[in-house]
Image: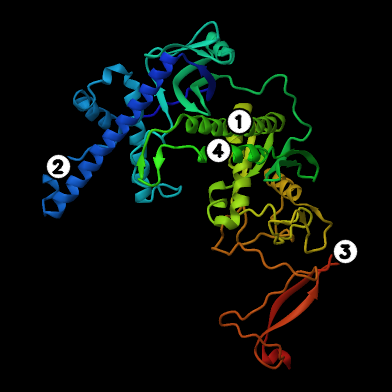
Amino acid sequence: MAGFEIPEGWTAQAFRFALDPSPAQVSMLESHCGAARFAFNHMLGAVKANLDQRAAERSYGIAERDLTPAQGWSLPKLRKTWNQIKGEVAPWWQANSKEAYNTGIDGLARALQNWSTSRSGERADAAVGFPKFKTRHRTARSVRFTTGVIRVEADRRHITLPRLGTIRTHESTRKLARRLGAGTARILSVTVRFTGGRWQCSFQVIVASKTRPAHTGRSEHPVVGADVGVKDLLVVATPDGTEVGRVGAPKPLTRAQSRLRAAQRQAARRRGPYDPQTKTHRAPSNRWQRANARVGRIHAKVAAIRADEIHKATSALATSHKVVAVEQLSAKNMARHGGRRKRGLNRALGDAAVGRIRTQLDYKSTWYGTTLVTAPRCFPSTQLCSRCGTKTKLRLRDRVYQCRNGCPPIDRDLNAAINLARLGDPTTWGTGTGTDSGSAANHRVGDGRGAIQKTSPTATSGAVGTAGGDETSTPHTTHPGVQGPLLREEKLPEMPGVIQTLTFRVTVTPEATD
């Protein structure tokens, strides 16, 4: 089935509003979310039973053509099977919208597709396991509507959804209502989700003429590089070394740790839904529910503060500059290993949400006509000296870049931002080797012939370290009468305050020594 194609000149965007449903509407929302979970679990059980049946028949030696027909994994095939059996397995299905069951079946189809592509090696991301059954207590309550009456009311304080009726919103919907009234927006779907102690709805919309706001002025620096970090969320600099801006990390989770710790300890003292002694589920106490609601509200506030700061910073970058260069970070891999040894670092990475910067810049640069340049993962923006291009190994706790060629010290993040800015401006970027010569593996030619992209140890004397060790089939000798390579040192051209030594090999034969 072909997916929806966004028309030329239109852009996808989401509008989210907090809902204020009545008690009856809350009950209906709970019912719809439960129906989506039921459809997911029932069809997953049917798929598992079909796979097990076919595997058992194969073990009996039955030919492939005589096996039980396979259950298709696509959304149309799963939905067709559900429509055939819903009268028997769910006689109450008419109490909810058909979109509730379609939500669960669509989630199952996507999960099975991800597992299939991951098993065959076609999925580039981390490995995905076989889908698991969803439980009531650990599954997010969510339902998605794609058909039926989906409308933003004219009073800009209510929305209308299928089978749920008109629901009041906590905030005004004027931003979306204005576009819908002008004909420059079209609603594709709406998702209702319970998060942070509130019911919220997200409208997936395509909008026309998404451009930079007229009141936003362009910066005098068209090309900048943005370094993302934990201490400072963003450090923005130009190719010539000018620091344009520095946005400190908000660290909302760190500030809320004392309140969160007290709330979690209070919730741990209450009687929860799981009894560790009998290993069974039980009805939770009202105090446990109130304590966990308090924990959820704290987390929701932390997430809201973090999202607000990141959106403001990325919007300012995308609207003020013509070219923005950032590095491609894999936050998941950065916080994957280490256990208790990296607990503090992993928490800081999660608090800063470094992975969201590039994601937001990706679509905001399309909105506002900004060119986004992404550095490859092997590009050592932090380790390269922005003055001479020498590569120097730094530890994570080193906040000042000390070049091993003797260049003046510079802030670590500012140095990385300058290198990224030069990567986004080809007229000011060299090759990154410090000698203006191409290397076997750099950001322009890729990985070359598989060269190792590791940094050599930092020399303690301030000079460039010399190569050492024995190379295969190349015996080392310094005797002039024996055939083989000799080592000779030559001084590079004089540079103020910089001592450089170049070591190279010269092959000397016995005839040449005469």
Q: Are marks 2 and 1 in contact (CB under 8 Å)?
A: no
Mark number for residue 266?
4
Q: Quadrant of the N terminus?
A: top left
**Mark sitting earlier along the chain (3/4):** 4
Q: CA distance from mark 2 to mark 4?
A: 54 Å
What amino acid does circle 2 point to?
Answer: Thr
On the image, numbered disc 1 is attached to which residue? 301
What amino acid does circle 1 point to?
Answer: Lys
Q: Are marks 4 and 1 in contact (CB under 8 Å)?
A: no
Q: Secondary structure at mark 2?
A: loop
Q: Are marks 2 and 4 in contact (CB under 8 Å)?
A: no
Return the x and y of residue 365 as percentages of the image width and height. 62, 32
Instruction: Examine the rendering and report whether any part of residue 269 can be seen.
Output: yes
Mark number for residue 68?
2
Return the x and y of residue 118 as percentages of the image width and height. 38, 48
Name the foreground residue: 452 vs 108.
108
Q: CA distance from mark 3 to mark 2?
A: 79 Å
Q: Secondary structure at mark 4?
A: helix
Left of 293 or right of it: where is 136?
left
Q: Secondary structure at mark 3?
A: loop
Mark number for residue 4?
none
On the image, numbered disc 3 is attached to which residue? 497
Q: Residue at x 28, y 37 (%)?
A: 44
Q: CA distance from mark 4 to mark 1?
A: 19 Å
